[in-house]
Amino acid sequence: MNDIYTPEVYISEEEIARRVLSLATSITKDYANSELVVICVLKGAFIFCSDLIKKIQLPLQLEFLAVSSYGDSQVSSGRVRLEMDLTCSIEGKHVLLVEDIVDSGLTVNYLKTLLLARHPASLKLATLLYKPSNLKYDVQIDYLAFEIEDKFVIGYGLDYAGRYRELPFIGILNAGH
Ligand code: IMP
């Protein structure tokens, strides 16, 4: 196989699984006795969200939202577009938004404003990754798996130009790829 397909491992499957379990345990404790709506932000959060909900020991409802902001670039276009909306009302419900990565914070900021306008009972954010070096918006993260350096990462749901999402680990593309 050409080495374009074998990016460097940045965070291993085992490390991810440990952190996912730890976040799910906290979420289970924090939401005991409440009904939870988990919103998975497509496409990047689909693997993280899937692993997370399998470890949350509460009845929950799963919803999806799709947004796009990057096109085929490694740099955000600066605009967020809602590509797919929820299929149910979240009014009066406890909502957990599940994202892949908070980079500038633009996407999460946009989504929180959108969802808060629908009057949920509460709204919290779980994100797999957070790159503090690039943050431009005030974003509160309630459940964070990993804070990372300013590197473009792929795998475990995250893509570069639509590729690499299927990798079981979080990786970095080598220069030139
Ligand atoms: P933000 O709006 O700048 O916070 O960027 C959030 C979105 O950009 C994420 O949901 C990802 O889809 C994408 N993104 C940001 N950084 C990376 C990265 O390092 N790899 C892959 N996608 C990224």
Image (cartoon, helix red, strand yellow):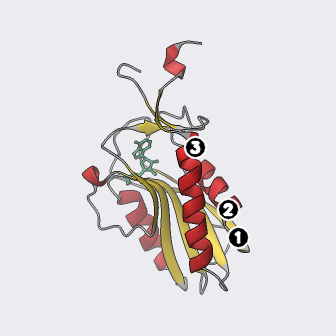
In which quadrant of the rendered image does the N terminus lie?
top right
Inter-mark Cα distance, 3 to 1: 21 Å
Is label 1 in a helix, a strand or a loop? loop
Inter-mark Cα distance, 2 to 3: 15 Å
Of all residues, the one furthest to the top in this rendering is: 2
Count residues near mark 3 (Cα–Cα under 10 Å), then give few for <14, some for 14-19, many for 20+.
Answer: few
Q: Is residue 81 rendered to the left or right of residue 134?
A: right
Q: Amino acid at mark 1?
A: Gln
- Vertical comparison of 144 with 48: above or below: below
Is label 3 in a helix, a strand or a loop? helix
Where residue 177 appears, x then y in whole percent?
41, 21
Where residue 61 appears, x then y in whole percent?
70, 71
The numbered mark, 3 or 1, whose residue comes first in the sequence reads 3
Q: Amino acid at mark 2?
A: Lys
Is label 2 in a helix, a strand or a loop? helix
The numbered mark, 2 or 3, whose residue comes first in the sequence reads 3
Residue at mark 2: 55
Residue at mark 3: 14
- Vertical comparison of 36 with 138: above or below: below
Q: Nearer the viewer, mark 2 or mark 3?
A: 3
